[in-house]
Amino acid sequence: MGSAANHLTNSPLHLQWPGGPLSGTMQLPASKSESNRALIIQALAGSGQLDNLSDANDTQLMQRLLAAEDSAELNAEDAGTVMRFLTAYLAMSGRQTVLTGTARMQERPIGVLVEALRQLGARIDYLGQAGYPPLRLRGRTPQPADTDDQPVTLQVRGDISSQYISALLMIGPLLPHGLRLRLTGKVGSRPYLHMTLALMRHFGAQARDLGVIFDVRPQPYHPADYTIEADWSAASYAYALVALALPGSTLWLPGLRRHSWQGDQAIVGIMEQLGVQTEFREDGIKLTQGPVATALNHDFTDCPDLAQTVAVVAAALQVPANFTGLESLRIKETDRIAALQTELAKLGGKLTDAGEGRFVVSASDFEVNGQTVATYHDHRMAMAFAPLALRGPLTIESPVVVRKSFPQFWQQLSQLGFQLAERN
Ligand SMILES: O=C(O)C1=C[C@@H](OP(=O)(O)O)[C@@H](O)[C@H](O)C1
Ligand SMILES: C=C(OP(=O)(O)O)C(=O)O
């Protein structure tokens, strides 16, 4: 399918729902988080078959850069996992290269990871602002710790991005005596750390969460096969569709598992309160409608990527909501708090900073009537707002942004019956 049919362009995309309940199947992409971990671990483990790798740009990019790892410069674009996981992988293998990314990536911090890798002997320079990409990797000097028989213990902040910790964990089995990470601060996105450990163990490593300490033994990976699960973060947009659609709407989502390694499966419980029921079947889940709660409270510390979807649905359904754990949203593809505030306001919704980490979602006259939603180079802005087209005509700017995690997103909406037209 070419990019024109998928609307992977910068022309604003006009969305309209012809009316009536929604039903059908949404084919989800594979999890980019699982895919990108499996690719790094496979590169360290040797052969083994990875099935259902994501077609997301973040994963295609990881594959391309791993295949080109001897290049003088590698561009991780806007992919956080690619930037962070490759930094650790390449630094530990002593590569000399430059790792860069988009202008936004150059504003996303990486100092915690670089500092930890330096303690493991990696020689890394900042080519721009200290603490941010681009980075020059200049090989690795073996550290005295390599000759002790104790694992290296590093203290790592857990309150900026869990991706630094995942990146370090995955190289742990290669260190002569393993690695111990002592996490400090409020640890965000912890389920992503457990996904990392689960995949590492699948490929033969010994790695455990001991609470404050994560412990990786110096046991090498072995090759294994793995089939990537469908993406629960992407599933959140299907939940939003069912929450916003007329009574009697249903959706079938193949490829999601009851026992998932993805923390964004938390969408099941959150959306139950916003009127979506989940039925697990052997090969996927069926979404149907149910009662809507009168209010919603949720802490997004463990599942930051769901916050935009849930904020938009709560505002549209006029369910007053209290959110906490949104700290990391300001350093993602855009400042997601600011982006949500601006775009919800166009529709009559509000995201108010109530202080001490609490945000309130509210809406008085929420109406979708032809507004244009800006996307700020953020796939999740496009996909979180698009389901509102069930409530009225809507235009999404720069629909191409979805390619980061869900390149078939617009095609899937079209197959469900949405009318899509590019505006120039
Ligand atoms: O490890 C991962 O695959 C991810 C971790 C999370 O980032 P943070 O740890 O920076 O919150 C999440 O937001 C991102 O989309 C994917
Ligand atoms: C934050 C995200 O990705 P990353 O940090 O990997 O760029 C995301 O996909 O929402």
Image (tube, grey):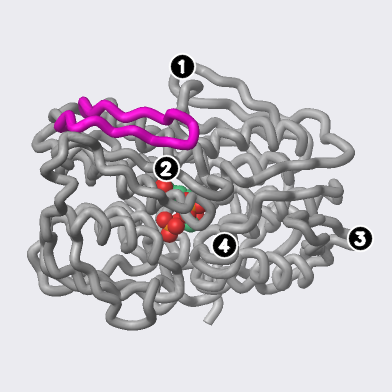
Residue 43's tag is none
- Name which quarter of the figure residue 88 lies in: bottom left
- Name which quarter of the figure residue 193 lies in: top left
Find numbered disc 2 in the image and state the secondary structure of the residue it sits on: strand
- Name which quarter of the figure residue 74 lies in: bottom left
- Relative to 407, is 420 on the left or the right? right
Pointer 3 or 1: first along the chain: 1
Of discs 3 and 2, which sits in the foreground? 2
Determine the CA span between mark 2 and mark 1: 39 Å
Please tell me whether the stretch drawn in magenta is mainly helix, strand or loop.
loop
- Relative to 384, is 284 on the left or the right? left
The kind of residue tagged 3 is Ser
The residue that label 1 is drawn on is 282
Task: Determine if the magenta segment contains residue 206.
Answer: yes
Q: Position of residue 397 (x, y in %)?
A: 56, 73
Determine the CA span between mark 3 and mark 4: 23 Å
Residue 382's tag is 4
Find numbered disc 4 in the image and state the secondary structure of the residue it sits on: helix
Of discs 3 and 1, which sits in the foreground? 3
Find numbered disc 3 in the image and state the secondary structure of the residue it sits on: loop
Say if residue 68 shows up in the picture. no
Find numbered disc 1 in the image and state the secondary structure of the residue it sits on: loop
Q: Is mark 3 within 8 Å of ligand 2?
A: no
Determine the CA span between mark 2 and mark 4: 37 Å
